[in-house]
Each structure stands twice: as structure tokens, then as C-alpha cells.
Amino acid sequence: MWVLASVTPAVMCVVRTLRRGSASGDSGRPAAGSGAAVLLLAAFGVAIAQTIVVAALAVFARELDVTTTSATWLLTAFMLASAVATPVAGRLGDLFGHRRVIVTGLALLLTGSVVAALSTHLDSFPGAVAGRVLQGLAGGVFPCAFGLARQSVPAERLEGVVAALSVTFGVGGALGMVVAGPLVDVTGPATLFWLIAALALLALAGMVRATLPSAPCSPTGRVDLAGAALLAGVLVAILLAVSQGRAWGWSSPWIIGLFAATVALSAAFGITERHVAAPLVDLRLLIGPRLLTTNIATLVVSVGMFAAVTLLPLFVQTSTALGYGFGYSPARTGLVMAPIAVCMLLATPLAARVSSALGARATFGAGAVLAAIALTGLGLLHEHIAAVLFWCAGLGLAYGLAFASLGSLVVGAVWRGQTGAATGINTILRTVGGALGAALATVIVTSSATTLGQPPTESGYTTAFVVAGAIALCAAGVTATRSIVNPRRRVDAPSRAKRLKDR
């Protein structure tokens, strides 16, 4: 019952998109409805996979006989693999067709889910992490979904579909935590992975049946394997350093070496991307004037969001014997997370209206400010569950506004042949920000413990929530600065949609 109540809003969102887009465009493109619904389903499957383990990390730690800190690698491994795979997939989609890459990504999601489920049944933590890595390689579905939408959805429907795809990243992540609790309580942790396998199989069937174009947007060039290897090295080094800093010691040679490797590999990556003919990450899309502030804001706001969603389940499941927390089971934890998912979903049409009136940048800024308020509230006012639920609702609304506007900001700033690359970069930044946020939150909370291995104190959670709020406020500051330097020109919704399609 809980699972149906959690997933139904997302299904209804897909149905509404299908109905709105049921007519073909005047240009003779295929009907948008079924294609848009399938793309949303594929993106939803990947999004829910990224966080479905969060509410059950304590259960996984117990079942697989590892510490709770080690169990967080079930989250970090997915995000790390996704961050590495996303730019490669975006580039492959531009070169060989987004539909082919989406099908491949869904196949990896299905395979990884089966591996993780069987490994959990066999009490194999390394196998479960390996399965999560395979699942994470499906992260490339996101940029290719944007690219395929741009090819197949009529201009008048494109902006709405882009916003829906963008917010799916957050909605799916929140729903993953809602669904996890009741499933784990009733059937055990392996069921979480079987659910993802079912979603991947359903999306694969939809991709086979849907009428979607297979032609590439930019059929010339090749994949930058050297850049991919260097980017993987950067991400592994920084995430390992942040996540293991307290356990290994921040001044230990290993941690210092990892931070030094991050700097060196980042420099090598930048040099390589500037000189290769077909770079994995076009630095003009990453740090160029059209997308620089959007990319910075994306990274920063993702750090704040995933810090919060990592902390919330741990906080509410903390035993009341420690003087804080609520001692909730995973199922009740899912109920606490439900307002985030529901309000994110409700924020999607609201974001479209605000963007039409004030622009996508103003919508993002409003969401970031609201997120800062909600996170600070969680840090300072969390004694009663009613207050926690209220702040969770505000957080869902905030991130619904922020994520729904990001897709339009990115897609509206590039030409069609750059859609996969640009949205891939933005998705990387969301994923990297999420991984850093989860690691940062864990470090802050565990550092509050008097000795290593002891339960954290309430002050650790307070500090982590407030820090996450300050980070979200920084994202709002980035967009405000951009608005002062280059005020937005008002564009009516029909002409904006046409510009998105024609570029």
C-alpha cells in the first residue's frame, strides 16, 4: 500500500505528459505522447535507483556485516559510476543516436540490479557494490533523454517535457527513499534491486515499442577515452578523500596524496580537453559564459540537497535513547520522506508558470532560497516530527522549483547538436554534487562523535543541516550575481519553445 501511494504520483505525471502530447507536431515528427512518456519512465528508473538504498543503509550494514559508514558506498559507488559514464554517454548519443545509448543504459541498469539483488541474497557486500556500479553506468540515460526529446517532441511541448525530465532527477531520488522503507520492512533489502530491475525492463519494452528517432545529432567525431580516464581518476580521488578522511586521518599521507592527485589529474584533464579534437567535456560548455553560472549553481545546490536526503533517514532512525531522533523503522522513515517527493512533483507545473512569468533563472533562485530556509529549519527546529514533516515539504517544493528550471536553462543555451554534451555535463555536476554532499554530510555527522565508531551527537546533525542550508544559499547567490551582470531578456513562452527546438 505504501509503495503504491508513493509511486502513483510519478505515474500520473507520466500519464498527464502522454495526454498533453498526444498530437503530432506540424513538422511531421512522430507523436510526442508515447515518446515523452517512455523517456520519463527511463529517467525515472535511473533516478529512483540512485537513492533507493539511502533509507535502508543501516539494514544493508547489518545484513551484509559491514559498518554503516562502509554501507554508504552503496550510494557513492552508484554516483561515482554515473558521473564517469554520463559524459561518455552524452557524447555517444550525439554521435550515434540517443535512443541506442538509452537502450544500452537501461540494459546496464537491469543487469546491475540483478547482480546487486543476487549478491544481497548471498550476503556479498563486494558483489552488491559491483551491482551498484553497473546500475550507475545507466546515468547516461539522462543526457540522452534530453537529446532525444529535442529531436522528437513538438516545439510547443518541448519546454514542459524538458522541465519534467529535469525534475525527475530529484523526484525519483526522493521516491526511492520513500519506497525503500516499507519494501525492506516487509520483504528484505534485496527487493529494492528487484524493483529497479522491473522498472528497467518496463522502460526497455517501452523504448522498443515507441516511435522515436535513431539518427545522431552530430554524426562526426569520436569519443575521448583519455579524457574519460582522467575524469574517472579525478572523481575517484576526491570522493575517496572526502569519504575516508576521518577514518584514515585528514593529515595522513593517503588523504594528502589523494587531494594532491585530484589537483594533478584535474590539471591534466583540463589540458587534455583543450587540445583534443573531440573533447569528452567541451570546456566552453563547462566554464564558458553561457553556462558557467548555471553549472556552478547546479553543483552547489546538488551538494546541499543530497547532504539533506542522506542525513534525514539517519536522523529519524536514531534511537531516542541518545536524546534525539525518533527511533523510526525504515517504513516510517519512508513516510517522513514522502512530503519531499510529493512536493517536488507538485512543484513541476508551478515551476513552469513561474519560469514563464519571471524566467528560469529566477525560478531556480527562488528554489535555492527556499531550500536554504528549509534546511536551516531542519537543523534548528527538529524536536517534533510535525516540524520535520513541514520542513521536508518545503525542501521538496524548493528542489522541485530548482531542478525543473535547470533543464530549460541548459537546453536553451546550446545548439541542438550540443544538447547531449551540455546536459551530460550538467548531469555530471548534479551527480558529483550529490556524491560530495552525501560524503560531506557523513563526515560532519560522524566527526561529532567523541570517539570513532560511537554514535554521533545531535550537534553533528544540526551543523550538517545548517551547512547544507548555507550551501543552498550560495547557489541562490550565484544566480543573483548572474542576474545583475546580465539581466534576463523577457521571452514569451511560445517563442522560447520554438527557439529551444530550432537551435
Image: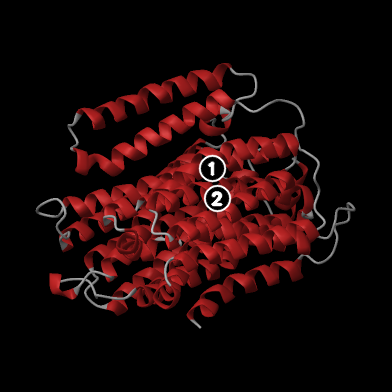
Residue type at mark 2 is Leu
Residue drawn at point x = 29 percent, y = 78 percent:
385
Q: Nearer the viewer, residue 203 or 299?
A: 203
Circle 2 residue: 406
CB under 8 Å between discs 1 and 2: yes
Circle 1 residue: 426
Q: Residues within 10 Å of mark 1 (few under 14, many from 20)?
A: many
* Left or right, residue 239 beside residue 250: right
The answer to which of marks 1 and 2 sits earlier in the sequence is: 2
User: Does residue 302 show up?
Assistant: no
Q: Nearer the viewer, residue 446 or 201?
A: 201
Which of the 4 quarters of the picture holds residue 316? bottom left
User: Does residue 22 show up?
Assistant: yes
Q: Position of residue 166 (x, y in %)?
A: 58, 55
* Left or right, residue 239 beside residue 273: left
Q: Secondary structure at mark 1?
A: helix
* Left or right, residue 383 beside residue 411: left
Residue drawn at point x = 67 percent, y = 64 percent:
202
Residue type at mark 1 is Asn
Q: Secondary structure at mark 2?
A: helix
- Distance between the Cα atoms at labels 1 and 2? 9 Å
Quarter of the figure that contains the C terminus: top right
Q: Nearer the viewer, residue 427 or 102?
A: 102
Q: Position of residue 294 (x, y in %)?
A: 51, 42
In the rendered view, tell whether residue 93 sits above or below residue 348. Answer: above
Q: Residue furthest left?
A: 450
Q: Position of residue 111 (x, y in %)?
A: 59, 53
* Left or right, residue 476 beside residue 295: left
Residue drawn at point x = 59 percent, y = 70 percent:
10
